[in-house]
Amino acid sequence: MKILKFRKSLSELILRGEKTTTWRIFDDKDIQVGDELSCLVWESKEEFAKVNVVSVREVAFKDLTKEDLEGHEKFSNDKEMYDTYSEYYNQPVTEDTIVKIIKFELI
């Protein structure tokens, strides 16, 4: 089974049904619609949920749509968003960086 890891604070949003979208810069798992994923807490590596992927698309950050933002945690501005993803991936992330938008539902 494919695995996605989430920070503890984000895992809590998923369990409450507030987070139904994740953005990934690198998808070494080739996540596709219909995949069942095991979700782990990044800090502890403990499974907290299983989800089913309902949609997937790739786009540059600058081309994110209102629909892409739905179900995703909010950022106060673009700089915060780029800084957050630069920290997650340990490399610069800009408006031209391609991001994979994965929408899911709890199983």
Image: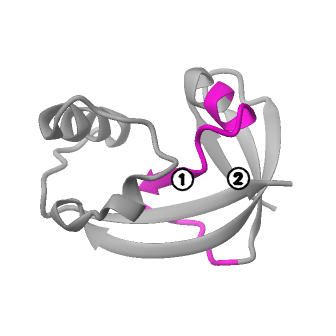
* Residue at left offset 58%, top offset 73%: 55
Amino acid type, label 1: Thr
Q: Is residue 88 left or right of residue 28?
A: left
Q: Closer to us: mark 1 or mark 2?
A: 1
| Kind of residue at disc 2 | Ile
Residue matched to label 1: 21
Give percent across and percent down for residue 5: 62, 41
Residue 25 appears in the rendering: no
Q: Is residue 39 above or below residue 44?
A: below
63 with respect to 71 (left or right): left
Q: Position of residue 24 (x, y in %)?
A: 43, 56
The quarter holding residue 91 reads: top left
Residue 30 belongs to magenta span: yes
Q: Is residue 24 left or right of residue 79?
A: right
Q: Residue at x 66, y 59 (%)?
A: 104
Res 61 → quadrant: bottom left
Neighbourhood count class around disc 1 (C-alpha, 10 Å): few under 14, some 14–19, many 20 upward? many
Say if residue 5 shows up in the picture: yes
- Which quadrant of the figure has residue 26? bottom left
Can you say which quadrant of the picture contains the N terminus? Answer: bottom right
Residue bounds of the magenta highlight: 12-33
Task: Determine whether the residue tagged by mark 1 lies in a helix, strand or loop.
Answer: strand
* Residue found 86% across the figure and 54% down from its top: 107
Cα–Cα gap, marks 1 and 2:
15 Å
* Residue 39 point in image, percent of width and height: 73, 44
- Quick one: SS at disc 2? strand
Residue at mark 2: 3
